[in-house]
Amino acid sequence: MEREKETGTAFFQAPVPFLKNERPQEKECPRKKEYPQKTGHPQKQRKQKEKGEEPAPHFLPSQTRPWIQLRLEASRTFFGPGPCELLEWVEKTGSIQEACARMGLSYSKGSRLIRDMERELGWPVTVRHTGGTGGGGTVLTDGGKRLVNRYRRLQAEADRAVEELYRKYFGE
């Protein structure tokens, strides 16, 4: 009770180090200067534009780049960067198991990706040879090789187109 009279606070509360109208100085974040300030809400910018006002410019960091990821689908998505890489590793290693190990996939997941891909396409992308004295292995069919080749070319062309569109809209 004595303390309450002296400081104006209850004994279990820490005394406030400033008066009601004073606030402690805020420390400026050292990383704050590294990032550009946000320019406002897009809806507000749209309204400004409708009124004939120019919205505040919005700058992207210089290291910003566009990135797209192509996927192929029929009744569902069956081919993209992951399955394409899996087929490339199968071609290099001659083994689904080794390809999965290199990618950090379980054999069952890799095998399922290939099975689903073949089901959607309606034709085989791999030919599997069972083991024996020479050992087994897996190779890509001509169709599987064409699929990988065309997908990679499509991805490269799409990347170039996106880069061009990025420069058009964001300049560099």
Image: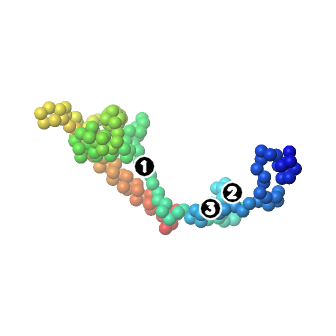
Secondary structure category for the residue under label 1: loop
Depth check, mark 3 against mark 2: the one in front is 3
Give the left or right position of residue 35, taking residue 115 as reference: right
Q: Residue furthest front?
A: 2
Q: Residues within 10 Å of mark 3 (few under 14, many from 20)?
A: few
User: Would you place residue 64 above or below residue 146 in this image?
Assistant: below
The residue where tag 3 is placed is 29
Residue at 66 percent across and 56 percent down: it is 41
Tell which of 104 and 122 is nearer to you.
104
Q: Is residue 67 visible?
A: yes
Measured from the top left, where is residue 71 in percent x and y? 41, 45
Image point (66%, 58%), residue name: 40
Q: Which residue is mark 2?
A: 44
Q: What is the three-letter code of the residue carrying label 1?
A: Gln
Disc 2 to disc 1, how far (Cα)?
31 Å
**Crowding near the residue tagged with mark 2, few <14, some 14–19, many ≥20 C-alpha atoms within 10 Å:** few
**Which tag, 2 or 1, sits closer to the chain's start?**
2
Residue at the location (54% across, 62% down)?
60
Is residue 20 left or right of 153 when viewed as pictured?
A: right
The residue tagged 1 is: 69
Query: Which numbered disc flags the more N-terminal residue, 3 or 1?
Result: 3
- Mark 3 residue type: Cys
**Image location (x, y in percent) of residue 102:** 30, 44
